[in-house]
Image (spheres, rainbow, N blue to C red):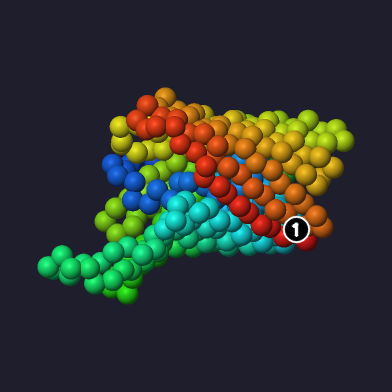
C-alpha cells in the first residue's frame, strides 16, 4: 500500500509537470481549431461544461481521459450539435473496459456546407464543403487512489475536392480521484498539448474541477470547474463552470449549468432519460450575454448512448 501511494504521488507530479512544461510551448495567438475546445455530449454541456471531475461516460475521451475506467463495460455515444443551417458539430465515441482500465476511440466532426466558390473573374462556379475530423485514441487506468488517462489525436481537414491538411491534433492528459464513498471527486486535465494543424497551433486548455454527490434514494451532483485557455485574444480565456444534476431512480435526470467569464455569461439546461441502458440526453444553451454581443441563445445539443 505504501509503494502504491508513492507511485500515485509520483505519477500525479509527473502529470502536472508535463502540463506546466508543455503549456507555454503550445501558446497560440490564433485558435486554429475552435471546435476542439467546444466540448461534446449533451450531458456535459447541460452541466455548463463542469465535467472534469464528473467524467464517467464516453465523452471522457474529450473532457478527461482519466474517467474512462469508470465507464460501463461497453458504451457507444453519438452526439450532434446543429450550430446553424449550414454548420455542424458531432461526436462519436466508443469505450471498452479492459481490466482496471478503459480504452476509448472517438471522432469529433465539424464543418460548413455549401460554401460558395468563384472563378478569378468573380463568377460563382458552385459550392463546396469544409470538413474537419479529429480522431482520438484514449486510455485510462485506475490505480486505486486515483485514475490517470491520456489521449492522442490526429486531425484531417478537407476543403471540397481541392485540398486537405492533416496533422497531430494534440495529446490530452488527465487525473481523477475521490473518496471511497464516491461522494467527492477531483479532476485535472490538460487538453491539446503539442497540437499543430499545418503551420497553426491549437491552444492548450487547462481545467481543474471538483464534484460532490449526495447519495440517497436519488442522486444530486454539484460540480465546479475552472478552465483556462492559453490563447492571446481580447476576451478573457479563464472561465468558471458550474453544474447541477439531479438523478431520479437512475432513470430521469434534470440538469442546469453556467459558464462565466469576465466578458461573457452562458446558461444551460437539459435532461436525460435512461431505459435499459439506452440513454437520451438533451441540453440547450438558453441564454448567452456578452459585453461585445447582443443576448443570444437557442443552441441545442442531443446525445444518444447505449451501455451494457
- Tell me if 214 is positioned left or right of 177 in this view: right
Residue 200 rendering spot, x and y as whole percentages: 29, 53
Q: Is residue 231 visible?
A: yes
Please rate how many residues cluster around mark 1, counting C-alpha atoms within 10 Å: few if below 14, some from 14 to 19, many from 20.
some
Q: Quadrant of residue 159?
A: bottom left
Which residue: 38% across, 52% down? 33
Residue 125 rendering spot, x and y as whole percentages: 24, 72
Q: Is residue 152 visible?
A: no
**Total count of labels:** 1
165 vs 118, nearest the viewer = 118
Residue 41 lies, with reference to residue 184, above or below; the image says below
- Tell me if 50 is positioned left or right of 155 in this view: right
Q: Quadrant of the N terminus?
A: top right
Residue 266 rendering spot, x and y as whole percentages: 50, 33
Residue 136 lies, with reference to residue 201, above or below; the image says below
Which residue: 63% across, 62% down? 94
250 vs 296, nearest the viewer = 296
- Tell me if 57 is positioned left or right of 298 in this view: right
- Tell me if 117 is positioned left or right of 298 in this view: left
Residue 185 rendering spot, x and y as whole percentages: 68, 35
Which residue: 47% across, 51% down? 83
Q: Which residue is mark 1?
A: 278
Amino acid at each position: 500500500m505504501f509503494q502504491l501511494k508513492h507511485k500515485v504521488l509520483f505519477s500525479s507530479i509527473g502529470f502536472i509537470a508535463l502540463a506546466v512544461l508543455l503549456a507555454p510551448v503550445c501558446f497560440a495567438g490564433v485558435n486554429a481549431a475552435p471546435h476542439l475546445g467546444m466540448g461534446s455530449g449533451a450531458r456535459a454541456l447541460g452541466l455548463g461544461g463542469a465535467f472534469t471531475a464528473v467524467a464517467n461516460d464516453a465523452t471522457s475521451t474529450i473532457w478527461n481521459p482519466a474517467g474512462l475506467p469508470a465507464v460501463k463495460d461497453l458504451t457507444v455515444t453519438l452526439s450532434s450539435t446543429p450550430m446553424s443551417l449550414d454548420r455542424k458539430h458531432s461526436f462519436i465515441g466508443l469505450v471498452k473496459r479492459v481490466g482496471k482500465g478503459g480504452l476509448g476511440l472517438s471522432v469529433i466532426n465539424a464543418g460548413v456546407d455549401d460554401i460558395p466558390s468563384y472563378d478569378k473573374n468573380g463568377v460563382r462556379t458552385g459550392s463546396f464543403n469544409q470538413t474537419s475530423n479529429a480522431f482520438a485514441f484514449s486510455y485510462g487506468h485506475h490505480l486505486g487512489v486515483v485514475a490517470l488517462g491520456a489521449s492522442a489525436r490526429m486531425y484531417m481537414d478537407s476543403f471540397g475536392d481541392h485540398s486537405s491538411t492533416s496533422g497531430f491534433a494534440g495529446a490530452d492528459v488527465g487525473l481523477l480521484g475521490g473518496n471511497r464513498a464516491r461522494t467527492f471527486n477531483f479532476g485535472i486535465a490538460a487538453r491539446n498539448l503539442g497540437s499543430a494543424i499545418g503551420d497553426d497551433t491549437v491552444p492548450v486548455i487547462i481545467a481543474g474541477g471538483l464534484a460532490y454527490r449526495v447519495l440517497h434514494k436519488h442522486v444530486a451532483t454539484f460540480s465546479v470547474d475552472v478552465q483556462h485557455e492559453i490563447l492571446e485574444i481580447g476576451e478573457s480565456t479563464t472561465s468558471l463552470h458550474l453544474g447541477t444534476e439531479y438523478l431520479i431512480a437512475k432513470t430521469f435526470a434534470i440538469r442546469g449549468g453556467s459558464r462565466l467569464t469576465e466578458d461573457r455569461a452562458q446558461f444551460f439546461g437539459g435532461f436525460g432519460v435512461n431505459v435499459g441502458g439506452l440513454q437520451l440526453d438533451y441540453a440547450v444553451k438558453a441564454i448567452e450575454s456578452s459585453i461585445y454581443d447582443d443576448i443570444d441563445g437557442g443552441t441545442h445539443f442531443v446525445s444518444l448512448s447505449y451501455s451494457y
